Amino acid sequence: MIDARVVDPNLLSSTDLYADFAARTLAPDVHPFTPTYALWSDGAVKDRWLWLPPGTQIDSRDAAHWQLPVGAKLWKQFAAPDGKLLETRLIERIAATGDDDVDYRAGSFAWRDDESDADLVPLGRDNVRGTDHDIPKATACRTCHTGEPGFALGLSALQLSEPGPGLRLADAAGLLSTAVAAYSVPGDVTTRTALGYLHANCGHCHNPNGAAWPDVNLHLQLDLTAATPDQTTTYVTTMGIMLTRFQHPGITERVAPGNADGSGLLYRMTVRDPGVPLSEQMPPIATERTDATGIAAVRAWIEAL
């Protein structure tokens, strides 16, 4: 039988995510997953999927930084709270040269108003379908993803260890080259929530491989070695550390233990003002609204220190 499906790389329907696109039936061996600590995207509802070529596995020898095999695909879909589909992003590993610019292809598809398909938009698109959701340029994806040696954010032992929906570490054994032990962020619930949030929302840039590292020695990406909160690089590079670049009246430290309002890290999370330079808000890209839940979590952690 001849496959009558039209294959067009500019259409989401041609990326092999769905066996039946119209019915939104996932293709075989496509694995939904949800990271324990999610990236804030201005309240968008997100779904994520992973597909590996038959007979391949994720290289998990470095338990903290998984490497996808050539041919692997990751999708992340953004929807408005009312369910309106906005964007689906695709990252595909296409080579293994050691150069991210060559090895990975990234692109975003903007959903049509009738949701019959989504179209590749290499130059991005603002205010998709009448919302304030902006699709980034394809080249902008590397700003955040280059800070993760495996290029994939949200897919790791740390992110899949805790109970949750979709693929979890206990289910992924056959997908990994090396067995990986579960890892829980150290500390009480307040501490874990804050450290996990900073890892997911800030750590991909604030680490030695990230885009922000040349400017400040601020390391917010968690690894799998710290047994206690004070051993994490987040504690080591924030607690009582004086600000060197950012200045604001009454704030002199990155994290002032017990004083959330005197902590630069928290203040910058609260900034989303067109009149303020993007370099002052954190993160400086991919968000136009503050995350009240995340701010509350980080505030509670600092106040409890």
Image (spheres, helix red, strand yellow):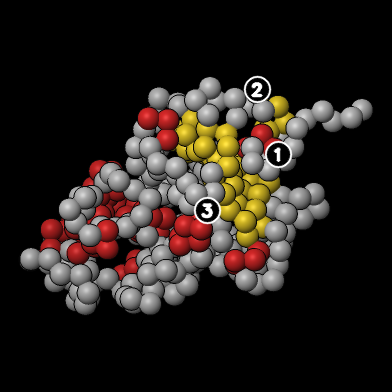
Q: Residue at x 68, y 46 (%)?
A: 51
Q: Which quadrant of the rendered structure holds the N terminus?
A: top right
In the rendered structure, find residue 138 and report the number of the disc placed on it.
3
Q: Position of residue 86 (x, y in %)?
A: 47, 34
Q: Nearer the viewer, residue 33 or 274?
A: 274
Among the two numbered marks 2 and 1 on one chain, the one whose residue lies closer to the N terminus: 1
Please identify the quarter of the rendering in which residue 80 is found. Answer: top left
Q: Position of residue 145 (x, y in %)?
A: 50, 60
Q: Residue at x 64, y 41 (%)?
A: 10
Label 2 sits on residue: 23
Q: Is residue 130 left or right of residue 243?
A: right
Q: Is residue 82 left or right of residue 29?
A: left
Q: Could you tell me the amino acid type at mark 1?
A: Asp
Q: Pointers 2 and 1 in contact (CB under 8 A)? A: no
Farthest residue in the right direction? Answer: 1
Farthest residue in the left direction? Answer: 250
Q: Which quadrant of the rendered structure holds the C terminus?
A: bottom left
Q: Is residue 17 left or right of residue 247?
A: right
Among the two numbered marks 3 and 1 on one chain, the one whose residue lies closer to the N terminus: 1
Q: CA–CA distance between discs 2 and 3?
A: 28 Å
Q: Is residue 226 visible?
A: no
Q: Could you tell me the amino acid type at mark 3?
A: Ala
